[in-house]
Amino acid sequence: MRKSVTAIVLLAALATSGCAGLFGKRAAPDEFAVARNAPLVIPPDFTLAPPVAGTAGLSPTDAQTQAIEALFGGPAPRSQSEVSLLERAGRDRAPVGVRSTAGDPDTRVVDKGATTSAIIAAPEGDGQDASAQVPQ
């Protein structure tokens, strides 16, 4: 019994030690000797000029406008059909702060009921066999 316990302990120690226990320790490669680091270089075309005294700097609104134009590229030209659709939808009659009042708790919301929920949850199809059933 004592010999079997000793053998199990030795096998467990050998199994947990990995391959180094069988083959000995090998020299690991030196990761710093693989490639030389390139020296740091200042870019040759460094065209920043220091600010000139007496000139006006950018105001925060100018900087914000420039950032938005850089990100989104200014107003895109609209097609004639898009302009027509926006005109019919009443783009010029919309209140200026309509997006702020849409999430207001005092905004009146009409519950359309189960029919609207059923239409929204309907699976998408090709439209060839479209039909509607309204509960009575």
Image: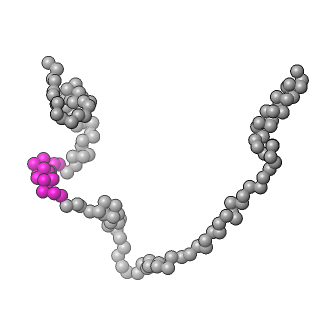
Position of 52 compared to 10: left or right?
left
- Quick one: 71 or 82, which is closer to the camera? 82
Percent x, y of residue 49:
43, 79
Residue at the spot x=85%, y=29% of the render?
7
Residue 129 image point, x, y percent: 17, 30
Q: Residues in magenta?
A: 78-95
Relative to 41, 24 lies left or right: right
Residue at 76% across / 37% down in the picture?
16
Q: Position of residue 72 (x, y in %)?
A: 31, 60
Colour mode?
one colour
Residue 101, can we see it? Answer: yes
Is the stretch drawn in magenta largely helix, strand or loop?
helix
Q: Is residue 8 left or right of residue 115?
A: right
* Residue beneath the point at 25% across and 34% down: 124
Q: Position of residue 1 (x, y in %)?
A: 88, 21
Toward the right, the furthest residue is 2
Rendered residue at 21%/30% (across/down): 119
Residue, far front: 23
The picture quadrant where one finds residue 108 is top left
The quadrant the C terminus occupies is: top left
Residue 79 colored in magenta in the image: yes
Q: Is residue 93 visible?
A: no
